[in-house]
Image: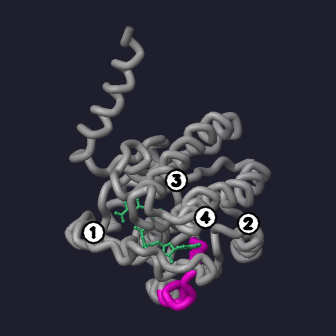
Amino acid sequence: MEDLTGKVAFVTGAASGIGLALAQGFAKEGAKVVLADIEADALKKAEGDLLASGAEVVAVQCDVSDPASVAAAADRSIEAFGKVHILCNNAGVAPAGEIDQTTPDDWKWCLGVNLMGAVHGIQSFVPKIKEQGEGGHVVNTASIAGLMALPTLGIYTATKYAVVGISETLRAELAPAGIGVSVLCPSFVKTRLHEGHRNRPAELGASPEEPNEFMAQMLAVATEPSVIAERVIRGIKRGDFYILPHTDVKAGVEARANEILAAFDLD
Ligand SMILES: NC(=O)c1ccc[n+]([C@@H]2O[C@H](COP(=O)([O-])OP(=O)(O)OC[C@H]3O[C@@H](n4cnc5c(N)ncnc54)[C@H](O)[C@@H]3O)[C@@H](O)[C@H]2O)c1
């Protein structure tokens, strides 16, 4: 998809961080944007700021862990703009803690948002994009934690490996329909990810490890989300599958791949 002018993009987690930067980037490209997020006030502010800049946007409050909520957001998108061409499954949370210290509710929350959120997006939007017959593009936000394991982020790592996995599957499944797929795997980005507990449903209780001070320090000096959004937009235009904005983590991925390859040749 070389020209995004007039295209319609649906972005989850659009009220903050990478999702907001994606929405701003798409708007700059002349695309219409549906902003979806669970956080009502931040969503309203993002919508107001983008409208004030002259962008064509609508906001839809949506909980990506709830399939009915995502399906309703897909219907609202079509109602607002008639079509959808770009789906960004980006909303995510990152509860911390060593695996043996995590709770079933930690898993339920993080799997629900990070993995099932992407699945719900695919199930609600891809049939509509296929039916339009104009091609399209799906961007799933994974993480570098989808390509190498990070201690104390076991749940998060599990969800992000899964997002990489479903993205690889989806690429093969959607190629015949002319729909591109990308999986975004950044390292640290300056966002509010370390404060993700702000959106944890009350019925799933509090996470003992929140807020994550280590992550807060790393994110404070990390890459600006706008830089990540530029890489995603370039990736959509070029048809890049893996979008890997941070070269400083390449050695970690290489070491893992080499260990796997070497294991094939063990006696
Ligand atoms: N910040 C990083 O260092 C980093 C690195 C790699 C990957 N990521 C990924 O980037 C994505 C975006 O996160 P971010 O860093 O911008 O964090 P962020 O907290 O700034 O933004 C995440 C957004 O998702 C929304 N959200 C949370 N739960 C939701 C739900 N159930 N339904 C709908 N929206 C929900 C939040 O309200 C928030 O607006 C996540 O998938 C995250 O895992 C972030």
Q: Quadrant of the C terminus?
A: top left
For the residues labelled 1 and 2, say whether their Cβ atoms are less than 8 Å apart.
no
Residue type at mark 1 is Leu
In magenta segment, residue 37: yes
Asked if residue 242 lies left or right of residue 175, the reply is left
Alpha carbons under labels 1 and 4: distance apart:
25 Å
Mark toward the viewer: 3 or 2:
3
Q: Earlier in the sequence, mark 1 or mark 4?
A: 4
Alpha carbons under labels 1 and 2: distance apart:
30 Å
Q: Read off the residue under disc 1.
A: 219
Alpha carbons under labels 2 and 4: distance apart:
15 Å
Asked if residue 99 lies left or right of residue 186, the reply is right
Q: Secondary structure at mark 2?
A: helix
> Is the residue indicated by label 1 positioned so its CB lies within 8 Å of ligand 1?
yes
Residue 14 vertical position relative to residue 94 in the rendered view, above or below: below
Residue 51: % across, % down? 51, 86
Q: Secondary structure at mark 1?
A: helix
Q: Which residues are magenta?
A: 33-45
Q: Secondary structure at mark 3?
A: helix
Q: Earlier in the sequence, mark 1 or mark 3?
A: 3
Residue 167 vertical position relative to residue 7 in the rendered view, above or below: above
Residue type at mark 4 is Lys
Residue 76: % across, % down? 74, 75
Residue type at mark 2 is Pro
Q: Read off the residue under disc 2.
A: 67
Q: Residues within 10 Å of mark 4 (few under 14, many from 20)?
A: few
Q: Residue at x 26, y 68 (%)?
A: 214
Q: Residue at x 63, y 80 (%)?
A: 203
Q: Residues within 10 Å of mark 3 (few under 14, many from 20)?
A: many
Q: Read off the residue under disc 4.
A: 108
